[in-house]
Image (spheres, coloured by chain):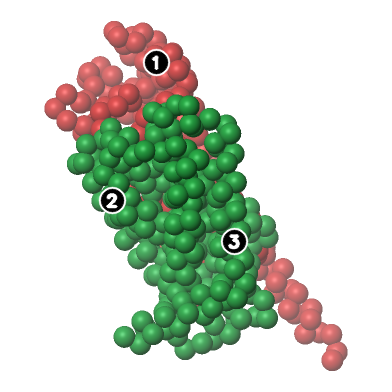
Amino acid sequence: MKYLWHVLDHLRKDLRLEWRSRDSINGMLFFALLVVVVFGLAFDPTSYPTVTRQISGGILWVALLFASITALNQSWGREQRNNVLEAQRMAPSPASALFLGKAIANMLFVLVVEAVLAPIFIVFFNLHALGNLWLLALILPLGTWALVVNGTFFAALGLRARNRELLLPLLLLPISLPAILAMVQATTGVLTADLDPIQISTWIKQLAGYDIIFTTVCILLFETVLNAE
Amino acid sequence: MEQRTPTLRNVAWLWFGISVAVLIVGFQQAIFLVPTDAAQGNVGRIFYYHVPIAMLSLIFPYINFAASLFYLYWRRRDPLKALTADALALSTAEVTVVYSSICLLTGMLWGRATWGIWWTWDPRLTSMLLLWLLYVSYLMLRRFSSTGQTHTLAAVLSVFAAVDVPIVYMSIRWWRTQHPAPVFGGGPDSGVDPSMLPAFFWNLAGWALWGLCIVLFRFSLERRRQLAEQEAALQAIEASLEIPQ
């Protein structure tokens, strides 16, 4: 119970910081929008509706992945200024509470970006989903959490590394590939209605399993990373 | 510096000689003695290199994982033992990258000759590529992180990689795809003709001996580097004590 309060404290602090600066959300939004526009120019999606359905799941996730990497690189930066991170290492709250609060905050930021991006995506790509659209309400949060939980962890891991802007994608992309595969396949299945519901539910289950496994590993190992010296 | 006994060195050279000898026998068996594959012709002989190396490149990551767990366990309790575990983790990670590269390359050669394409996004191939990517990123992290925390961060990443590999490996067994079905333990039709077995086992033994030999050489090299580093640190401390305050 006390643990939960610690998590909420960290979450509240991150949300307040973001509310005052709005750095990461604005950055992510514009970046994701640019990726969508670039892919739109590259593929001319309005003239081939079938092709658009097949590729837009992948494009949506690639845009979100790149956008969240740009924000995750910054997310620990504000803790490093004025040695706030050192203070948190000495604080009586468990280290994993700090991690969970930060991960949930990042998750909320990416969800806001998704909420803004989805209508733009539908308009620009002339999308008309053929499958069960409400399944996306399950796939999007699960996929986002898979990206954000590992991303927050590896951003902390590379914190004191030499070129950490480069290190984060180098570590995060290989680890996330199974999750990316699952979320792209499930999203494409929903948009094209080519996969039958059993296959889609298998992908969603794999995604949920991935989330559970890696959240556990992150929580167990975060203290080691935070106190690595 | 640690005293290196001549016996240990002789054993290492003997091991090296034996693994080369076994590899030569394996080469003779696979290239000259085994009858040519009825369906594939001489291209099928890649099998004797590709499959043993693929099997071994799935074993070394787990040595790396175990060594990393030992590192994390000993990190505070016994730092000197932890350094030994870290040297083992580094050497197995490097050998993993070498073996999975060879596996990918021989597979691509075979694919070009048999399928007519170098690469396809088959689950089997993808998971091997992923293994390669994971351990390359492990070596990258070791290079990029600042000294002092490299060991801990690398051990943490190794846990992530070891969790990731089975996820992909299992997810591929559920589909029928372009890669040939598992040869050993893959079902009622699996297994090979008995005439092919000697060549296969000679090569498996040879590459296993060779891989362990490389791991041991790399391990002792890393140990020597660690000891030299400790020696230098000790001398620096002693020198700083002699300066009159």
Q: Crowdedness of circle 1 by 10 Å Cα count: few (<14), some, many (20+)?
A: some
On the same chain, marks 3 and 1? The answer is no
Residue at 60% across / 76% down in the picture?
A20
Residues at marks 2 and 1, CA–CA distance in whole angstroms:
41 Å
Chain for numbered disc 3: A
Instruction: Identify the residue under disc 1.
Output: B115
Q: Is residue A33 above or below residue A150?
A: above
Instruction: Identify the residue under disc 3.
Output: A26
Tell me residue A218's x, y (percent): 41, 65
On the same chain, marks 2 and 3? The answer is yes
Could you tell me if residue B121 is visible in this image?
A: no
Residue found at the far left of this picture: B188
Residue found at the far right of this picture: B244
Residue at 72% across / 68% down in the picture?
B232
Colour of the chain lettered A: green
Colour of the chain lettered B: red
As helix, strand or loop, the secondary structure at mark 2 comes to: helix
**Dot 3 amino acid type:** Asn
